């Protein structure tokens, strides 16, 4: 068993999660069993209660873990199935240590960062990697942060326990371009490497994020000052068209080879054609459509990360370039729907709280009446139901009790079992649930199978009291949970493609395996455009 640790230096947002994910992809192509996990130094127990403004999207796993969006990159680039064990925060570590202290497990000892917190971290490394050849652990934050120190100290200890030959440290650093000097500067990378060495960690590989090519001379300089072999200085330039170029650009730098040699791994030669084909489809598509994403956190880069990625995957499946128009639903509420004009498809993503709801309902109505393909995800499905109940069934005050607790027509409502919940952490319907698809529906056609499993993260549900009335009015239930009979998918008859899913399909789409619903949605958009 081999362990790779990825740290970051100089600044955050270096894309070290993507580098870790792309490395995972390359190692898998060499026949290795890989898993990638994330250590986050913040004190929140999980990102589930964190605002999208602070943290971007919450990515949900099959087991219901609410995790950092980097786990989305890991799952999109590799085949490894991730679990709760692969998303670890300082908050979780301290929660466990304090619970053990309260139980008396430490037998009266003084409980300290070293060894108790670091032992718990090392335990999580072992647990995260069960059953694989290579475990890649990305450490969040930037080297030198106070919060990250216990993690780095634990890694230092871990290399002693596991053996230096079984551990590879990769440090990602920024090589900034200084315009006035007209050159790239290696000093920040040198200094953050020095910071790591102070803690007792000597990186084996430097991944250098730079806007411009790194010269041979600079590689030699970094090799000398940072004490890594010159071939282990890896250039990671900003990708031009798509993040899915990353496995290819890093392969050119022999990133995976350096790792394999460093760890003495037995690996077969790799075939990059999967990634080459993905890039070919992105660069030279036969079709082009424009999809509107109507949401609340539209100005944020990361709040709908997996949605945007899955739309791209749907494009790959259809040999189609997809331009995304980001529309703030609140801007539709004055009744001016011109921001929706010319779209080939409309997607309403998940969300919480009542801000912008009426704008989303207007967008759903627009899509339904003008027969524009509509894909509603989680909240977007509930929106489609409310819209249909109001404007087709004639229940003018139809609403979700999330937005109007006193509505006379709660077509979307909270389940009895959820009503008593007061705590906000991890209390929703979370993780993978089965859904049985009905014959003759868009969903059944897209999936090509009868039973699916998809990931959930919500409190409210389609209210089955309205099922018959809605079906008679032309809405169709396409998928239900076989145990609870909760409605998971609705469709609108007499419409080319209008579908709402209570679950989050965007958490199960990969560029190499586009999600069936995203593929079908983009296909409908291509057909609409004609
Ligand atoms: N707010 C809705 C609910 O809790 C939808 C949640 C979501 O879109 N993820 O049911």
Image (cartoon, rainbow, N blue to C red):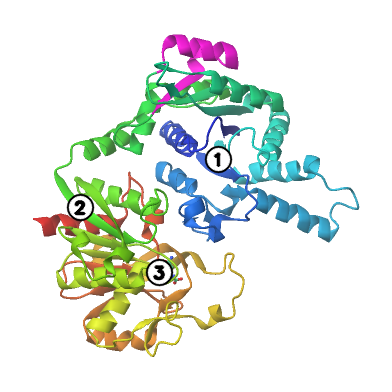
Residue on which the image places disc 2:
290
Q: Report which residue position mark 1 lands on.
A: 132
Between disc 1 and disc 3, the foreground one is 3
Q: In which quarter of the image is ligand 1?
A: bottom left
Which element is circle 1 on?
A: loop
Residue furthest out toward the left: 530
Read off the residue under disc 3.
355
Q: In which quarter of the image is residue 167?
A: top right
| Disc 2 residue crowd, few under 14, some 14–19, many 20+, Cα 10 Å | some
Q: Does the image show residue 11?
A: yes
In the rendered image, residue 432, in percent from the top left (x then y), is placed at 47, 63
Q: In this view, does 511 lie above or below 191?
A: below
The residue at 18%/51% (across/down) is 289
The Cα–Cα distance between marks 2 and 3, rounded to whole angstroms, is 25 Å
Residue 435 located left or right of residue 83: left
* Lower sequence index among marks 2 and 3: 2
Residue 149, quarter of picture? top right
Kindly identify the residue that appears in the image at 46 percent across and 52 percent down.
Answer: 56
Check disc 2 and report its element: helix, strand or loop.
strand
Query: How far from the left and from the top, in percent, is residue 163?
Result: 69, 27
Q: Are marks 2 and 3 in contact (CB under 8 Å)?
A: no
């Amino acid at each position: 068993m081999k362990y790779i640790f990825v740290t970051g230096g100089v600044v955050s947002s270096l894309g070290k999660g993507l580098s870790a994910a792309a490395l995972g992809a390359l190692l898998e192509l060499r026949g290795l069993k890989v898993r990638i996990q994330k250590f986050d130094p913040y004190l929140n127990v999980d990102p589930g209660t964190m605002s999208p403004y602070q943290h971007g999207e919450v990515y949900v796993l099959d087991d219901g873990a609410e995790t950092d969006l980097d786990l989305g990159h890991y799952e999109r680039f590799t085949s490894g199935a991730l679990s709760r064990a692969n998303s670890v925060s300082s908050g979780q570590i301290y929660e466990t240590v304090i619970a053990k202290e309260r139980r008396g497990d430490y037998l009266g000892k003084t409980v300290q960062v070293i060894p108790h917190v670091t032992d718990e971290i090392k335990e999580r490394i072992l647990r995260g990697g069960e059953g694989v050849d290579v475990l890649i652990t990305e450490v969040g934050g930037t080297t030198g942060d106070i919060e990250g120190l216990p993690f780095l100290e634990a890694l230092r200890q871990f290399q002693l326990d596991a053996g230096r030959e079984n551990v590879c440290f990769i440090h990602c650093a920024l090589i900034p371009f200084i315009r006035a000097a007209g050159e790239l500067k290696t000093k920040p990378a040198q200094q953050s490497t020095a910071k790591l060495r102070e803690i007792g960690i000597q990186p084996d590989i430097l991944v250098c994020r730079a806007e411009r090519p790194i010269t041979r001379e600079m590689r030699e300089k970094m090799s000398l000052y940072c004490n890594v072999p010159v071939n282990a200085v890896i250039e990671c330039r900003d990708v031009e068209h798509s993040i899915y170029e990353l496995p290819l650009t890093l392969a050119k730098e022999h990133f995976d080879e350096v790792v394999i040699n460093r760890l003495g791994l037995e690996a077969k030669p790799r075939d990059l054609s999967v990634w080459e084909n993905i890039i070919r489809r992105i660069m030279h598509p036969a079709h082009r459509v424009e999809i509107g994403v109507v949401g609340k956190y539209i100005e944020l880069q990361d709040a709908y990360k997996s949605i945007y990625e899955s739309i791209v995957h749907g494009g790959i499946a259809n040999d189609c370039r997809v331009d995304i128009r980001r529309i703030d639903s609140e801007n539709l509420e004055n009744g001016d729907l011109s921001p929706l004009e010319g779209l080939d498809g409309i997607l309403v993503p998940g969300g919480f709280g009542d801000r912008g709801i009426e704008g989303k309902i207007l967008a759903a109505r627009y899509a339904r009446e003008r027969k524009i393909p509509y894909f509603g995800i989680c909240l977007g499905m509930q929106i489609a139901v409310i819209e249909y109940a109001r404007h087709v069934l004639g229940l003018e005050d139809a609403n979700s009790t999330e937005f109007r607790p006193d509505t006379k027509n709660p077509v979307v409502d909270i389940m009895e079992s959820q009503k008593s919940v007061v705590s906000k952490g991890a209390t929703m319907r979370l993780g993978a649930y089965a859904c049985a698809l009905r014959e003759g529906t868009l969903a059944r056609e897209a999936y090509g199978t009868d039973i699916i499993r998809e990931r959930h993260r919500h409190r409210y549900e389609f209210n089955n009291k309205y099922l018959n009335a809605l079906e008679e009015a032309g809405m169709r239930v396409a998928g239900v949970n076989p145990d609870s009979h909760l409605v998971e998918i609705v469709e609108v008859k007499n419409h080319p493609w209008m579908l709402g899913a209570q679950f989050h399909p965007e958490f199960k789409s990969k560029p190499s395996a586009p999600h069936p619903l995203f593929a079908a949605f983009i296909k409908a958009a291509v057909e609409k455009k004609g």
